[in-house]
């Protein structure tokens, strides 16, 4: 019985949909609407909406003014050829290129074999500090290795990255 009903309903739907079709043609150009989203608001509602908009715009401007910018002295550090199961160190200089103190809240990597250490104190505008990175290749980890170090800070992009590379061979 079910096998008979499914084709019947499918055909009924197709036939009913096809009866009132209207052809729509696409046109290029700008779409213009005279409909206003707030057309039916009372003056009190409109005033409250405008106040809320101004409050949100100020909050956004305050947030953006708290951002700063940073720059690394290198975006990629290549250790070259290294031996397995050895410690390799690099210091990456980070410069606060903005007008507010740079606060680095976290530094992490894509693998446990790469251990970065973040600066503890805020970095004043125009000043620099060091992010220390230790790369310790694991036994059996041979060939080309590439790891990303992520720096979380009070910049607009929130996370900035640089890369650590090495070629591990016996």
Image (cartoon, rainbow, N blue to C red):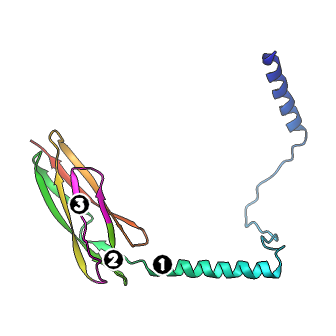
CA gap between label 1 and label 3 equals: 28 Å
**Dot 2: few (<14), some (14–19), or many (≥20) neighbours within 10 Å?**
many
Q: Nearer the viewer, residue 92 or 45?
A: 45
Q: Is residue 149 visible?
A: no
Q: Is residue 115 above or below residue 47?
A: above
Drawn side of residue 166 relative to residue 108, left or right: left
Nearer-N-terminus badge (2/1): 1
Numbered circle sitting on residue 64: 1
User: Which residue range is magenta in the image?
Assistant: 106-126
Q: Is residue 52 above or below residue 132?
A: below
x 87%, y 43%: residue: 21
Residue that lies at the very extreme toward the top in this rendered image: 1
In which image quadrant can residue 44 be found? bottom right
In which image quadrant can residue 121 be found? bottom left
Please say whether residue 108 is one of the residues in the magenta stretch: yes
The residue identified by callout 3 is 116
CA gap between label 2 and label 3 equals: 18 Å
Q: Position of residue 138 (x, y in %)?
A: 17, 44
What is the secondary structure assignment of the residue under circle 2? loop
Drawn side of residue 59 relative to residue 3, left or right: left
The residue identified by callout 2 is 102
Please say whether residue 94 is one of the residues in the magenta stretch: no
Nearer-N-terminus badge (2/3): 2
CB atoms of marks 2 and 3 within 8 Å: no
**Dot 3: few (<14), some (14–19), or many (≥20) neighbours within 10 Å?**
many
């Amino acid at each position: 019985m079910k096998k008979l009903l499914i084709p019947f309903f499918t055909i009924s739907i197709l036939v009913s949909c096809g009866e009132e079709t209207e052809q729509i043609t696409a046109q290029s150009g700008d779409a213009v609407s005279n409909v206003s989203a707030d057309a039916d608001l009372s003056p009190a509602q409109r005033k409250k909406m405008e106040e809320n908009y101004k409050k949100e715009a100020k909050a956004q401007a305050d947030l953006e003014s708290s951002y700063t910018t940073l720059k690394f002295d290198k975006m990629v550090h290549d250790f070259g050829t290294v031996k397995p199961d050895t410690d390799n160190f690099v210091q990456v200089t980070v410069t606060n290129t903005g007008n507010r103190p740079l606060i680095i809240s976290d530094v992490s990597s894509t693998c446990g074999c790469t251990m970065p250490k973040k600066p503890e104190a805020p970095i004043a505008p125009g000043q620099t500090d060091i992010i220390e990175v230790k790369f310790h290749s694991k036994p059996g980890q041979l060939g080309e290795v590439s790891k990303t170090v992520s720096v979380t800070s009070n910049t607009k992009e929130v996370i900035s990255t640089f890369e650590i590379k090495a070629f591990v061979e016996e």
